[in-house]
Image: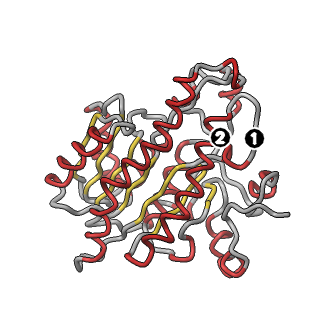
Amino acid sequence: MSPGKELSVGNFTATRHSTTYDYISPLKLNLAGKHILITGAAWANGVGYATATAFARAGASAIALADLQGISSDLTAKLKVAAVEAGRTEPVVLSYTVDIASRENVQAMHNALFQELSGRLDIVVNNAAYMEPSKLFLDSDPDVCWKTWEVNVRGLLNMTRAFLPMQLSTRTNGTEGLCIMINVSSSGALSARAGSGNYRSSKLALLRWTETLQLEYGDQGLLAFCVNPGAIKTKISEDILPETVRDALPDSPDIAGDTIAWLAAERREWLGGRYVSCPWDMEELMKKKEEIVEKDKLKMRMVC
């Protein structure tokens, strides 16, 4: 993957999906006994909550939701209903109000979650993010610019420092823990555009940092990768993009949620450190495994 190749990356699989499809159906997965943590999950039409719903329908035993806005009791109740309607056991659903940019907030959530889940954590989905208003750099508020980095980068560092040891312990203590971390990036990480430099740059940083994290902890059991959720009308762009633009975004939250759950339900070591776009056809992606590994594709590099 090289700068200027966003179009080819978007077409990495011949088939592109805007909504969920049978191959990635949560009903085909078995996540019984698994514990999940998802940030940025307070909005019913958002990627985080769609992901939580997919995990519930896949049979996850415990799902923890975290968001700066807090999680409503209505949303936690709906997750349990979604599981039961899918023929699964009702999961334990935990909710936390947390600012991931605050190390103290994240550590307090860790302490509570550790007690609630008896120290077991299989999957972390770092979905929470911030997007600043679109302005040229010299016209922007420096504090707002920095907030983008505080949430999108420092927040992920805080989450990983707090919860990766818990995941590694789950992986190595004989319980067949998955130890999978999915960091939600963006197709915006792949190209520059005037007016959104901080958001795009921060999401690009996640790609390289995730690759490095895989190199550092892969031999201890970590499997980490980044996903582009798709072009979805979510809360993050509510005050940023014109409503006409947001209404034209083609993808549904379930393409992100179901794809993330599908990717996390099984360890695919060869995907470690790589970028995956949720609208890609996952069956076609799996058929490209040999090509991806042999040519070390889906990683950031400069081609000269």
**Disc 2 crowd, CA 10 A, few/some/many (<14, 14-19, 20+):** many
Q: Is residue 92 above or below residue 118?
A: above
Return the x and y of residue 182 as percentages of the image width and height.
47, 57
Q: Which residue is mark 1?
A: 192
Residue at 52% x, 49% y is 184
Is mark 1 in CB contact (under 8 Å) with mark 2?
Answer: yes
Q: Which residue is mark 2?
A: 200
Q: Left of 227 or right of it: where is 188?
A: right
Give the SS element for disc 2.
helix
Residue 125: image tag: none
Is residue 131 or residue 255 the one in the foreground?
Answer: 131
Return the x and y of residue 93 as percentages of the image width and height.
24, 47
Return the x and y of residue 304 as percentages of the image width and height.
85, 63
Return the x and y of residue 284 as percentages of the image width and height.
68, 70
Q: Left of 103 or right of it: where is 288?
A: right
Residue at 50% x, 54% y is 258
